[in-house]
């Protein structure tokens, strides 16, 4: 099956540190959360199998009014450069649990290590799947992590994150939480999980449930804000104050501004290109 796309990069989107359910072999990307997916980009076409078109578009943010979004957040010279550099990315919608596990594992870590740990956990906790003759394991479910117990989780050498991952799995196992919840309900639920602070929660909201006004701030974002947005931040000191200030500044699509800034800052020496 084929989806026509314009101004979109599958590789850039899936390599941007916003989703951890995919791995690449050759020209193809693979993912297996609910059902296996195989997808690759050929020019302005996405060639895929395993999921229906609506699911693929939702997963990859392809329903977003990207030109309107770019125009709306393009408020200054810095974000204008970031949009030009990173404008082929889209904000994904990976789902609440995949985003929760991925961004808990991201605490004091890096993308390569997160993906390596998830692959090891998938091999142990995942179920067998197959697509186009390729067999692989599913993303680790919270049910399997919880039911196999805390001690089994220790084998993955997650360090202090071990208790956070198990706490999250236990919470999801014992409590109903889904994408039908409001953003406030999701915040109020997930903030009770050991290890989930404001930054991880914002990542889950933006990249897990596609709440496009969320504005996560990690070291790259905070560094950029201190260099280029001090006049906007004013007297904002705390994480919540800074987040509110930036959301007020960029508006309802602040999450896209965050992604463009993050990608641009992470892949460049920001002092030398502005």
Image (cartoon, rainbow, N blue to C red):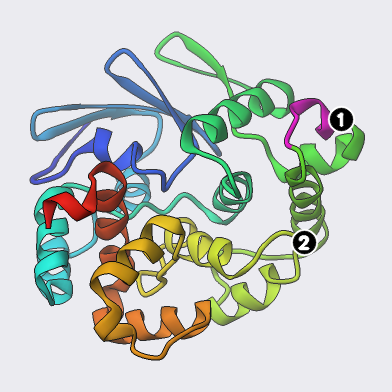
Question: Residue 232 appears at what percent x and percent y?
Answer: 27, 84
* Quarter of the C terminus within the rendering: bottom left
- Pointer 2: what residue? 194
Q: Residue at x 65, y 23 (%)?
A: 120
Query: Which residue occupies 24% across, 57% down?
Result: 260
Image vertical order of residue 147 relative to residue 254, above or below: above
The total of numbered circles placed on residues is 2
* Label 1 residue SS: helix
**Viewer-nearest residue: 268 or 56:** 268
In front here: 37 or 259?
259
The chief SS type of the magenta part is helix
**Comes first in the chain, label 2 or label 1:** 1
What mark, if any, has residue 152 been given in the picture?
1
Q: Residue furthest bottom?
A: 235
Between the C-alphas of marks 2 and 1, the distance is: 19 Å
Q: Examine the structure image and report whether residue 156 is included in the region drawn in magenta.
A: yes
């Amino acid at each position: 099956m084929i989806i026509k796309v314009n101004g979109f990069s599958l590789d850039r989107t899936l390599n941007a540190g916003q989703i951890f359910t995919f791995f690449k072999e050759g020209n193809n990307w693979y993912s297996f959360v609910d059902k296996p997916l195989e997808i690759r980009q050929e020019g302005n076409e996405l060639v895929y199998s395993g999921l229906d078109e609506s699911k693929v578009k939702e997963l990859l943010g392809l329903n977003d009014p990207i030109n309107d979004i770019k125009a709306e957040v393009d408020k200054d010279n810095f974000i204008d450069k970031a949009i030009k550099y990173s404008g082929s990315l889209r904000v994904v919608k990976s789902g609440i649990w995949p985003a929760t596990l991925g961004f808990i594992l991201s605490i004091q870590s890096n993308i390569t290590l997160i993906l390596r740990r998830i692959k090891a956990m998938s091999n142990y906790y995942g179920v067998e799947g197959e697509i186009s003759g390729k067999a692989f394991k599913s993303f680790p479910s919270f049910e399997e992590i919880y039911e196999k117990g805390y001690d089994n989780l220790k084998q993955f050498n997650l360090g202090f994150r071990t208790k956070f991952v198990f706490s999250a799995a236990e919470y999801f196992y014992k409590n109903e939480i889904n994408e039908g919840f409001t953003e406030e309900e999701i915040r109020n639920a997930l903030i009770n999980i050991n290890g989930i602070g404001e930054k991880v929660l914002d990542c889950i909201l933006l990249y897990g449930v596609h709440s496009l006004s969320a504005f996560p701030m990690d070291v790259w974002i905070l560094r950029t804000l201190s260099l280029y947005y001090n006049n906007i931040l004013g007297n904002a000191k705390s994480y919540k104050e800074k987040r509110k200030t930036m959301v007020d500044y960029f508006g309802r699509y602040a999450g896209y501004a965050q992604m463009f800034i993050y990608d641009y800052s992470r892949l460049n020496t920001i002092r030398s290109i502005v």
